[in-house]
Image (spheres, grey):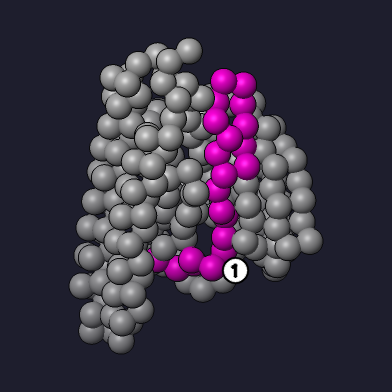
């Protein structure tokens, strides 16, 4: 399976078939990478696993936060943090590699579960030219900006729809967090652009 690059999204809405709840404090997450067959090491609180993507894995809530480091031949190791604490309207995977996958689901409610799906793009180790590198990261930035614009717009609409129900302060706090994560992602993308090798 090859999902469109450059895209990295952790989607929970509409993906219930991908995640069966194993127990009260354990959930299943389907982990995929582009390229496939990456070796991923997961480390958390009293938790350590290694898997090859794509694959599903049972994750206990008490292991959060998890660090995921994925590596494939010809690609840079990408490290991500997968956590349960951003549940509710934002259930985010804050990816150290400069990408953030978010899920907006107002109906999800409280709980300590990992997202049912986690996707990660690995950057090439080198580019043939500066132009090739910039084209790649420009596409990544455009995709990120479009994704965040839609997510924040959806959140703003939901904040407005619950403004009379007493949930607005929490909603606005989530919205501010989403905007901060958007800026963080764009800055980290630029840092990765500048640190990537050019030339053979």
Q: How many marks?
A: 1
Q: Residue at x 79, y 61 (%)?
A: 46
Viewer-side residue, 131 vs 5: 131
Q: Residue 22: which quarter of the image?
A: bottom right
Q: Is residue 93 magenta?
A: no
Q: Quadrant of residue 198?
A: top left
Q: Does residue 17 appear in this view?
A: no
Please tell me which residue is depicted at 67% across the width and 38% down the height of the picture. 40
The secondary structure type at the circle numbered 1 is loop
Q: Position of residue 85 (x, y in %)?
A: 54, 68
**Residue visible at 24% across and 51% down in the picture:** 149
- Left or right: 45, with 3 as reference point: right
Residue 89 percent across, percent down from the top left: 40, 66
Return the x and y of residue 96 as percentages of the image width and height. 50, 49
Nearer to the camera, 20 or 120? 120
The residue to which callout 1 is attached is 112
Locate residue 175 relative to residue 95 in the image: left or right: left
| The image quarter in which residue 191 lies | top left
Between 14 and 153, the one lying in front of the other is 153
Tell me which residue sits at (43%, 15%) in the image. 199
* Left or right relative to 72: residue 183: left
**What range of the chain is rendered magenta?**
69-89
Reply above or below: 149 against 122: below
The prevailing secondary structure element of the residues shown in magenta is: loop
Say if 42 sits above or below 140 in the image. Answer: below
Q: Viewer-proximal residue, 174 or 15? A: 174
The answer to whether residue 148 of the structure is visible from this angle is: yes
> Is residue 86 covered in magenta?
yes
Viewed as shown, does residue 152 lie left or right of 48?
A: left
């Amino acid at each position: 399976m090859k999902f469109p690059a450059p895209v990295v999204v952790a989607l929970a809405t509409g993906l219930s078939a991908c995640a069966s709840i194993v127990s009260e404090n354990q959930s299943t997450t389907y982990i995929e990478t582009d390229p496939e067959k990456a070796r991923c090491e997961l480390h958390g609180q009293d938790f350590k696993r290694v898997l090859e993507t794509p694959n599903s894995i049972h994750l206990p809530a008490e292991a959060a936060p998890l660090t995921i480091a994925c590596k494939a031949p010809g690609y840079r190791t990408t490290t991500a943090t997968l956590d349960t604490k951003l549940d509710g309207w934002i259930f985010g995977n804050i990816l150290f590699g400069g990408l953030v996958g978010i899920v907006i689901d107002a109906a999800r409610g409280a709980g300590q579960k990992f997202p049912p799906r986690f996707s990660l793009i690995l950057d090439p180790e080198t580019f043939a030219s500066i132009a090739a590198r910039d084209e790649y990261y420009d596409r990544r930035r455009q995709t990120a900006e479009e994704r965040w614009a839609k997510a924040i717009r959806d959140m703003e609409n939901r904040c407005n729809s619950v403004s009379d129900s007493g949930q607005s302060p929490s909603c606005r706090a989530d919205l501010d967090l989403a905007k901060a994560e958007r800026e963080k992602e764009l800055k980290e993308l630029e840092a990765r652009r500048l640190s990537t090798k050019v030339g053979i």
